[in-house]
Amino acid sequence: TQHHSMLVIEKRPGVHSLLDLKMINRFLFVMETLSTVRHPNVSQLVSIFHLPQRLYVCMEVGGRRTLYSRLKCRDSPKDNAEPWRVPPDVLRQIIVQVCAAVIHIHQVH
């Protein structure tokens, strides 16, 4: 079963500054890059669509949750229990996978 994540971006009317234009160009570059990159550690861009007020970016999510939610959303420490920490071996594996994805994207583009 494929799972998807939807990024919703509120549109602002008009380009108000050079910074706005640079941000728009950067966003378009990232979306173009994601649409062409194929790597097991890079989420695939599924679709982009827009309505007058919002831009929607649909991307696949490996498993049911994003990496961010997996690292952040742990049960709150109960009473005086120690907070959850990522075991070093798991953290090392995550870092290696993220670095492999970034290296692949930079080699391709």
Image (tube, grey):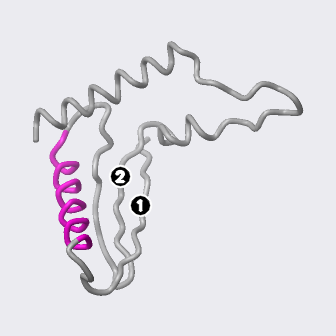
Q: Secondary structure at mark 2?
A: strand
Q: Report the residue that reaches farthest toward the right.
A: 79
What residue appears at the point 35 percent right and 21 percent down from the top-left corner?
96
Which amino acid is tagged 1?
Leu
- Marker disc for residue 7: 1
Label 1 vs label 2, nearer the camera: 1
Q: Does the segment drawn in magenta span residue 100?
A: no
Which amino acid is tagged 2?
Met
Q: Quadrant of residue 11?
A: bottom left
Q: Is residue 34 left or right of residue 87?
A: left
Measured as percent of width and height from the top left, residue 24 is found at 23, 68
Measured as percent of width and height from the top left, residue 52 is found at 34, 85
Q: Is residue 14 above or below residue 83?
A: below
Q: Which of 40 and 32 lies nearest the eye of the viewer?
A: 32
- Tag 1 and tag 2, C-beta contact below 8 Å: yes
Q: Report the residue that reaches farthest toward the top.
A: 89
Q: Quadrant of residue 28?
A: bottom left
Q: Is residue 56 left or right of residue 77?
A: left
Q: Residues within 10 Å of mark 2 (few under 14, many from 20)?
A: some
Q: State the residue position of label 2.
A: 59
Q: Is residue 28 left or right of residue 68?
A: left
Measured as percent of width and height from the top left, residue 22 is found at 20, 66
Q: Quadrant of the N terminus?
A: top left
What residue appears at the point 79 percent right and 33 percent down from the top-left corner?
77
Residues in magenta? 19-37
Q: Secondary structure at mark 1?
A: strand
Measured as percent of width and height from the top left, residue 78 is found at 84, 33
